[in-house]
Amino acid sequence: MQNEVVLLHGWGMNKQVWQLIETELAAELKRPVRALNLPGFGGEALPETHYDLDAIVESIDTFIQPNSIVIGWSLGGLVATRLAATRPDKVAHLVLVASNVQFCESDIWPGIKPDVLAQFKVQLAKDSRKTIERFLAIQAMGSEHAKADIKQIKALLLQAPEPAGTALSAGLDILQSTDLRHEFSKLTCPITGVFGRLDALVPAQVVDELSWLNGAFTHKILPKASHAPFISHRQEFITYLKSVL
């Protein structure tokens, strides 16, 4: 049986964002492709325990077959990395899309400025819908067709229920505090990254750090893409994945 491809979405999103490439990806890769909702997003139930990265991995684990190709976008990349680290039998190939192993910038690691994430946390408590819209705007920043990208993502998101407040708040906590550099360095499966040169959330220079951490890491930077390369540069994205998978 062929390895199944599993798609994991980012913060504030749901599995509908993969609709644009799901069918085409399955046809090009000649394998089954399935998108999952993270708990609390797209109408999926919240974990019964405390909501953290391990609880997310626990809740999606039963839906993932052994030896899957797991593609994680943004926050979904953190989930996919932790899955590969804790359940290596489940992940035959890890693909990170506009993702980081430590999202919060530090003196020695490129990422999002801590005050930007802190601001999101404050705004989220006041107005979750507006916060998600602002997050969408940042995601498309720099892309040639930013407005069209935002419109497309919003239309897809609206096809599913709004995310639970608990999932949004805990998701930001995960982005603020998670550091998977050590786990990433120990991974033995092939690791592929697809990044946007214009991404305001995951700086393109992170690829050098990831390459240094793990020799199995290969990557492509799309020069005109931002934080959602599979939407803004769908064909380039699919062509590259086909070449590595």
Image (cartoon, rainbow, N blue to C red):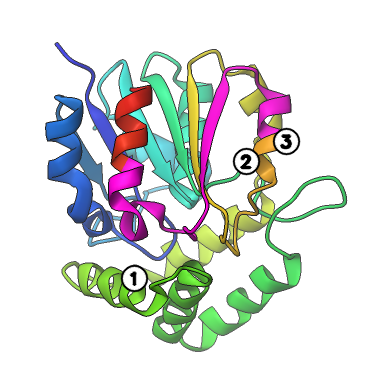
> What's the residue type where badge 1 is placed?
Asp
Any part of residue 61 in sight: no
Which of disc 1 and disc 2 is earlier in sequence?
A: 2
- To which residue does mark 1 refer? 149
Which of disc 1 and disc 3 is earlier in sequence?
A: 1
Label placed on residue 209: 3
Q: Position of residue 5 (x, y in %)?
A: 25, 30
Query: How busy is the neighbourhood of tag 1: few (under 14 within 10 Å), some, or many (20 plus)?
Result: many
On screen, residue 186 above or below 111:
above
Foreground residue among 112 and 183 = 112
Q: Position of residue 70 (x, y in %)?
A: 36, 31
On screen, residue 56 above or below 145:
above
> What's the residue type where badge 2 is placed?
Val
Q: Position of residue 77 (x, y in %)?
A: 48, 42
Q: Residue at x 49, y 59 (%)?
A: 224
Any part of residue 93 in sight: yes
